[in-house]
């Protein structure tokens, strides 16, 4: 019967990058040949591959969960900003609401980024649209009362 204990594989696995049959042999004071025979009989290399794959899969799953939690937190924060911006817009006059409009615009852009949309779009922003509409609808067109201008020819 071998002096190599049955938990020798556990020690071998725990060695990580420094894993070797020589290290196991030295630890248990047996020959490398004894360790090699046990490793072959118990398929240590295949077990190591299987365990390392499982460790990587668990790490990947943990990363996915962490990224998902981060995304959820960011989306909640963005929604809070959106809600506060919309509430501010409801209580303010249009001329005093530009900070709320900027905050809402920023929150919308952040939400799009978090959801994988492009962070920059060439479409007109909410702020630009509101400014343009305010200029168009809230200003008096002094030229409307006069007829169209005619250019004189020389």
Image: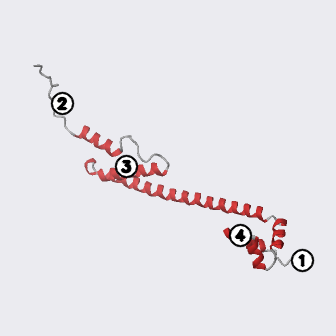
- x 62%, y 59%: residue: 60
Q: Position of residue 18 (x, y in %)?
A: 68, 70
The residue that mark 3 highlights is: 105
- Tell whether label 2 touches label 4 (CB within 8 Å): no
Label 3 environment density (alpha carbons within 10 Å; few <14, some 14–19, many ≥20): some
Label 1 environment density (alpha carbons within 10 Å; few <14, some 14–19, many ≥20): few
Q: Is residue 117 above or below residue 78?
A: above
Q: Nearer the viewer, mark 4 or mark 2?
A: 4
Does dot 3 land on a helix, a strand or a loop?
helix
- Image quadrant holding the C terminus, namely top left
**Precedes in sequence: disc 3 or disc 4:** 4
Q: Nearer the viewer, mark 1 or mark 4?
A: 4
Q: How many marks?
A: 4
Q: Nearer the viewer, mark 3 or mark 4?
A: 4
Label 4 environment density (alpha carbons within 10 Å; few <14, some 14–19, many ≥20): few
Q: Position of residue 65 (x, y in %)?
A: 58, 59
- x 73%, y 70%: residue: 20
**Precedes in sequence: disc 1 or disc 3:** 1
The residue that mark 1 highlights is: 1
């Amino acid at each position: 019967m071998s002096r190599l204990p049955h938990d020798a594989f556990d020690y071998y696995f725990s060695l990580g990058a420094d894993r070797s049959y020589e290290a196991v042999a030295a630890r248990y004071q047996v020959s490398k040949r004894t360790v090699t025979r046990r490793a072959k009989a118990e398929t240590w290399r295949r077990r190591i591959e299987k365990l390392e794959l499982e460790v990587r899969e668990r790490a990947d799953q943990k990363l996915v969960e962490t990224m998902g939690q981060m995304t959820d937190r960011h989306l909640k924060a963005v929604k809070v900003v959106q809600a506060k911006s919309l509430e501010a817009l409801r209580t303010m006059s249009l001329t005093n609401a530009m900070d709320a409009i900027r905050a809402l615009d920023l929150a919308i852009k952040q939400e799009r980024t978090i959801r994988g949309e492009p962070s920059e779009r060439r479409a007109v922003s909410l702020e630009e649209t509101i400014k343009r509409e305010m200029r168009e609808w809230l200003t008096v067109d002094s030229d409307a009362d006069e007829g169209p201008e005619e250019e004189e020819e020389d």
